[in-house]
Image (cartoon, rainbow, N blue to C red):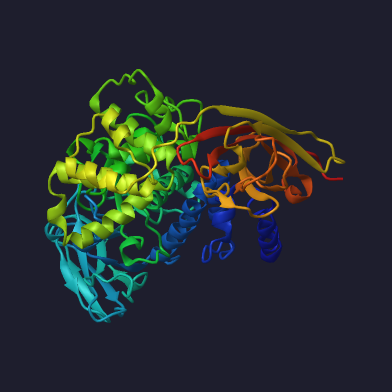
């Protein structure tokens, strides 16, 4: 794809490829506001696009995360305009309000660092524009050390008034920073959400190199370590996190793929927001995306602070590709207060596992993520665990608890986000804090609401993991009268092969499930991004499915499939249809069809992937089986 073509021509070609090529590239290009061709020099945007293309992201569920990535890149460009003396300071919640609203352990930073470095006693002159609302307050600071967390009261804070020129004198050396906040708690009706205050520097201070994702080029990054730098560090910003890199490290990383590093950090932050049920278009004010920022230091290692979104990830290894250590520390910044004390170093690793599979794919086991995660990403993990006669061996208690939480995440993909949304309601901006003080209170809430959200009586699961909870919680689960977890009776494996034959219009793979109640059996997806996740009575003549396949360069593409099934000699419906059939044959005959015409815009090449489906019974809620269809698609070249 050429980026030097006209804007309309390229835009239209991208629209044709939506859902075919890398959903990462498509999401960023089509994101409203991310003006890829807005500036004469398009090398900055091309570097971001190339990076997103190169990442092997093979989860259909990642679409919202990738769209949010475009949102943050656009925001980075808004905060740091083309004019290096101008800044647009976002209006944010106060740290306390954000933490209480999200029911989170940690809070992020409201500070926007400038390129201006001041010595003690040095003055800077700047103009502050209008405030979007009367209750907005802005302040100026000097931050002396970005390699640590800090309280705003200790960094030379001075309140600002709107529409005024200000002369500010630094009491100590450091970087000039600004922050604007709205103390209102009502985010949904908070009219200053997403607004900015314009501030322009008119005189004073020395310049510090700052790399902005989507605005600077990789070539500019390579030149920054040799530029005059009174701070002894280089700043980077990707729309969500401010990074500080000691100049000595920046020299070593001059040829590093810095764009990929910043993009992977951005994907991590966006995916963790999605996992926690947060979104910029959320219907509930409690679930509205927070616009505050992380502060990431490569000067120190390896911890996370509860204040100012600070994480220290100066590991010995190179910073790209990102890996478990960084995912783990970001996870600390996204833990909610339902986590009891022994989960401090555990629940954040559920997020790390999610990030590992997002960037590295679902492999046979997750040992490539971390040595203490040798198990597989199994959508029937809960039921399979209950069938095991020997308990898994773990090196420590944290690893044991992680497998318990990971099994729930694998088996119920929507569970984690719904648990977060429900906890925010229960916590109610801290007004119900007294209900979540002790570990016993948190465990009781967790087991009851996890059972409710999953629609399964999980007492046996929690008991086998030896998770202690009260008789009151046990009775509450029992009173819901939920079915037990499904224990898949078997796995049916098939293969759908499409050959490079231009005349071939469709390819079919089929199989049979013989069950005593097969009249009421159908196939459903484990994830709603793939297809329907529940049975319906009767229904359409086929079910539309989406599967992700990767080409020989590990690039992900979505393909369209059709699913059909018939019970005995009765009519054929969609695979998720259940109905009574008078046929003497109890078997369920299913078929998955690849139709060339519905995938005509798939680029030529060979693609492989897997379609995982679950067999479920309309009446017997505790019966189940697995169907795994290995996909091998060869798309011919167009004549």
* Left/right of residue 461 with respect to residue 70 in the rendered view: left
Instruction: Look at the image and tell me whether residue 223 can be seen.
Output: no
* Left/right of residue 503 with respect to residue 457 in the rendered view: right
Tell me which residue sits at (69%, 35%) in the image: 585
Q: Where 16 falls versus 517 (above or below)?
A: below
Tell me which residue sits at (34%, 41%) in the image: 457
Comparing 585 with 119, the one in front is 585
Q: Where 179 falls versus 615 (above or below)?
A: below
Residue 334 image point, x, y percent: 30, 48
Quadrant in which residue 471 is drawn: top left
* Left/right of residue 56 with respect to residue 339 in the rendered view: right
Number of numbered discs overlaid on the protein picture: 0
Residue 2 image point, x, y percent: 69, 53
Comparing 82 with 26, the one in front is 26
Residue 371 image point, x, y percent: 37, 23
Residue 406 image point, x, y percent: 37, 35
Instruction: Look at the image and tell me whether residue 615 can be seen.
Output: yes
Q: Could you tell me which quadrant the C terminus lies in?
A: top right
């Amino acid at each position: 794809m050429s980026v030097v073509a006209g804007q309309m021509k390229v835009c239209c070609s991208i629209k044709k490829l939506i859902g075919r090529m890398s959903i990462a590239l498509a999401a960023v290009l089509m994101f409203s506001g991310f003006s890829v061709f807005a500036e004469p020099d398009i090398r900055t945007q091309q570097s971001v696009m190339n990076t997103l293309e190169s990442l092997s992201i093979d989860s259909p569920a990642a679409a919202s995360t990738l769209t949010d990535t475009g949102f943050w890149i656009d925001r980075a460009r808004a905060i740091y305009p083309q004019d290096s003396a101008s800044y647009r300071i976002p209006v944010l919640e106060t740290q306390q309000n954000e933490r209480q609203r999200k029911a989170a352990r940690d809070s992020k930073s409201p500070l926007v660092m400038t390129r201006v470095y001041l010595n003690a006693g040095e003055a800077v002159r700047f103009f502050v524009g209008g405030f979007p609302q009367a209750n907005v307050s802005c302040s100026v600071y000097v931050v002396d050390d970005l390699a640590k967390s800090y309280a705003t009261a200790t960094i030379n804070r001075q309140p600002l008034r709107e529409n005024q020129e200000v002369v500010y004198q630094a009491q100590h050396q450091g970087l000039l920073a600004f922050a604007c906040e709205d103390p209102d708690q009502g985010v949904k009706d908070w009219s200053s959400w997403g607004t900015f205050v314009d501030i322009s520097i008119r005189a004073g201070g020395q310049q510090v190199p700052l790399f902005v994702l989507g605005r600077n080029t990789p070539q500019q990054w390579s030149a920054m370590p040799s530029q005059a730098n009174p701070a002894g560090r280089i700043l980077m910003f990707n729309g969500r996190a401010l990074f500080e890199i000691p100049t000595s490290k920046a020299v070593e990383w001059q040829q590093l793929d810095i764009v990929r590093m910043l993009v992977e950090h951005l994907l991590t932050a966006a995916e963790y927001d999605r996992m926690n049920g947060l979104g910029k278009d959320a219907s509930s004010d409690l679930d509205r995306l927070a616009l505050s920022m992380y502060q990431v230091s490569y000067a120190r290692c390896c911890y996370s602070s509860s204040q100012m979104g600070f994480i220290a990830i100066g590991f010995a290894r190179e910073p790209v590709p990102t890996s478990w250590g960084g995912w783990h520390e970001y996870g600390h910044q996204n833990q909610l207060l339902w986590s009891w004390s022994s989960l401090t170093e555990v629940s954040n690793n559920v997020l790390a596992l999610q990030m590992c599979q997002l960037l590295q794919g679902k492999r046979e086991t997750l040992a490539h993520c971390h040595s203490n995660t040798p198990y597989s990403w199994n959508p029937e993990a809960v039921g399979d665990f209950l069938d095991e006669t020997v308990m898994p061996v773990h090196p420590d208690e944290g690893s044991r608890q992680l497998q318990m939480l990971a099994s729930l995440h694998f088996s119920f993909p929507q569970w984690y986000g719904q648990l977060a949304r429900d906890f925010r309601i229960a916590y109610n901006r801290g007004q119900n804090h007294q209900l979540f003080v002790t570990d016993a209170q948190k465990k009781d809430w967790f087991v009851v609401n996890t059972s409710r959200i999953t629609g399964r009586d999980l007492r046996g699961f929690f008991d086998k993991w030896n998770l202690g909870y009260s008789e009151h919680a046990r009775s509450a689960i029992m009173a819901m009268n939920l079915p037990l977890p499904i224990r898949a009776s078997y796995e049916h494996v098939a293969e759908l092969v499409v050959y490079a034959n231009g005349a071939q219009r469709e390819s079919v793979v089929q199989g049979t499930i013989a069950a005593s109640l097969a009249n009421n059996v159908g196939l459903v997806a484990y994830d709603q991004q793939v297809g329907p996740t529940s049975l319906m009575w009767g229904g359409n003549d086929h079910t539309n499915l989406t599967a992700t396949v990767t080409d020989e360069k590990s690039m992900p593409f979505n393909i369209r499939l059709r699913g059909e099934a018939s019970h005995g000699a009765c009519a054929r419906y969609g695979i998720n249809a259940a109905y009574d059939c008078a046929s003497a044959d109890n078997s369920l005959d299913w078929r998955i069809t690849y139709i060339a015409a519905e995938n005509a815009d798939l680029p030529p090449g060979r693609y492989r992937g897997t379609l995982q489906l679950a067999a479920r019974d309309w009446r017997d809620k505790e019966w189940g089986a697995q169907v795994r269809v290995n996909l091998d698609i060869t798309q011919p070249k167009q004549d």
